[in-house]
Amino acid sequence: MDRAADDVKQAIAGELQLMDPRVRASRELAGQLLDPQFVEVGGSGRRWTYETMLSELPDHPGSSAEDPRFEPSDVSGVRLAPGLVHLTFETVLGEIRTRHSSIWRKGDGAAGWRMYYHQATRVPPGVE
């Protein structure tokens, strides 16, 4: 496998881990997957930082075993540069369908791949 494909594969693995309720409920596990400079523009329009996301993620939908689970689809990515990957995909969580774009960057040393930026856009019912 070439380096670009391997980078994309690793970023996708991190993205899928962030959808796991065990990871979402754990500040420690989620913190290993988010870059310290992380920023998100959520489907609600709210802006999240590393600290606000880690503080509030355990209370978000999909963060407990009793909640509906994220159902990802059409996950694809491209390596923008060494250590930088852009992913796009859709999720369904209960009745909510969302389109996502995220940028992952490889940290120094053992840090591995971490989400640097994420944007989510809710898809209204009936939109293809």
Image (tube, helix red, strand yellow):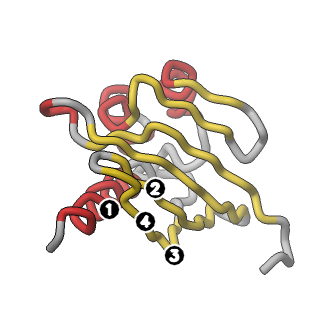
Q: Residue at x 47, y 59 (%)?
A: 87
The residue sitting at the front extreme is: 81
For the residues labelled 4 and 1, say whether their Cβ atoms are less than 8 Å apart. Answer: yes
Is 46 on the left or on the right of 58, as rendered?
right
Q: Earlier in the sequence, mark 1 or mark 2?
A: 1
User: What amino acid is at disc 1?
Assistant: Val
- For the residues labelled 4 and 2, say whether their Cβ atoms are less than 8 Å apart: yes
Q: Can you tell which mark lies on residue 8?
A: 1
Tell me the distance, in whole angstroms, between the alpha carbons under discs 4 and 2.
Answer: 5 Å
Of mark 4 and mark 1, the one earlier in the sequence is 1
Name which residue lies at 77% across and 42% down.
Answer: 44
Task: Report the disc number at residue 77.
Answer: 4
**SS state under label 4:** strand
Q: Secondary structure at mark 3?
A: strand
Which residue: 51% across, 68% down?
A: 72
Q: CA distance from mark 1 to mark 3?
A: 14 Å
- Where does label 2 land, which residue? 86
Q: Depth check: give the residue in front, 60 or 51.
A: 51
